[in-house]
């Protein structure tokens, strides 16, 4: 989860994500990136966040499937998308 209202967090969040994506134990894990706090007036748009985060480069280099969702924990924006991702990702394979 990345704070979309705090652009100074981007570089450290990116480093943490790259570290997780390179971990052998997570090589087959699906990844959900949440850009949260989109309800705040100072938040960066999804286009701005993706650009600063270089998300397209990360997705093209990663072995894992990566999904990006804008959310607001305060007003519930994006919650249906998160729940759908959880349902489809955690479905019982049997």
Image (cartoon, helix red, strand yellow):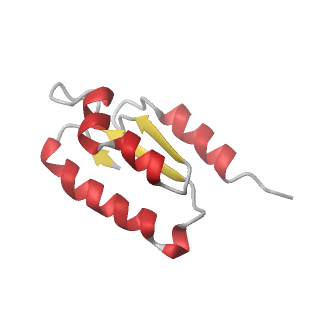
Question: In this image, 6 relative to 70: left or right?
Answer: left
Q: Is residue 12 visible in this depiction of the protein?
A: yes
Nearer-the-camera pick, 17 or 63: 63
Q: Position of residue 65 (x, y in %)?
A: 56, 49
Q: Is residue 37 visible in this depiction of the protein?
A: no
Q: Residue at x 23, y 39 (%)?
A: 52
Q: Residue at x 31, y 27 (%)?
A: 47
Q: Residue at x 38, y 45 (%)?
A: 57
| Quadrant assignment for the C terminus | bottom right
Q: Residue at x 36, y 59 (%)?
A: 17
Looking at the image, the residue that sits furthest to the right is 94
Looking at the image, the residue that sits furthest to the bottom is 25
Q: Position of residue 49 (x, y in %)?
A: 27, 36
Query: Residue 53 is drawn in which quadrant?
Result: top left
Question: In this image, 32 relative to 4: left or right?
Answer: right
Question: In this image, 86 relative to 24: left or right?
Answer: right
Q: Position of residue 6 (x, y in %)?
A: 16, 42
Count the labels in the image: 0
* Looking at the image, residue 17 lies above or below residue 66: below
Query: Residue 64 is drawn in which quadrant?
Result: bottom right
Q: Position of residue 16 (x, y in %)?
A: 31, 63
């Amino acid at each position: 989860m990345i704070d979309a209202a705090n652009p100074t967090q981007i570089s450290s969040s990116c480093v943490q994500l790259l570290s997780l994506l390179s971990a052998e134990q997570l090589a087959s894990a699906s990844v959900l990136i949440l850009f949260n706090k989109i309800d705040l007036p100072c938040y960066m748009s999804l286009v701005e966040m993706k650009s600063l985060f270089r998300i397209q480069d990360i997705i093209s280099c990663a072995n894992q499937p990566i999904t990006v969702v804008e959310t607001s924990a305060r007003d519930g924006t994006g919650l249906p998308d998160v729940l759908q991702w959880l349902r489809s990702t955690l479905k019982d394979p049997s």
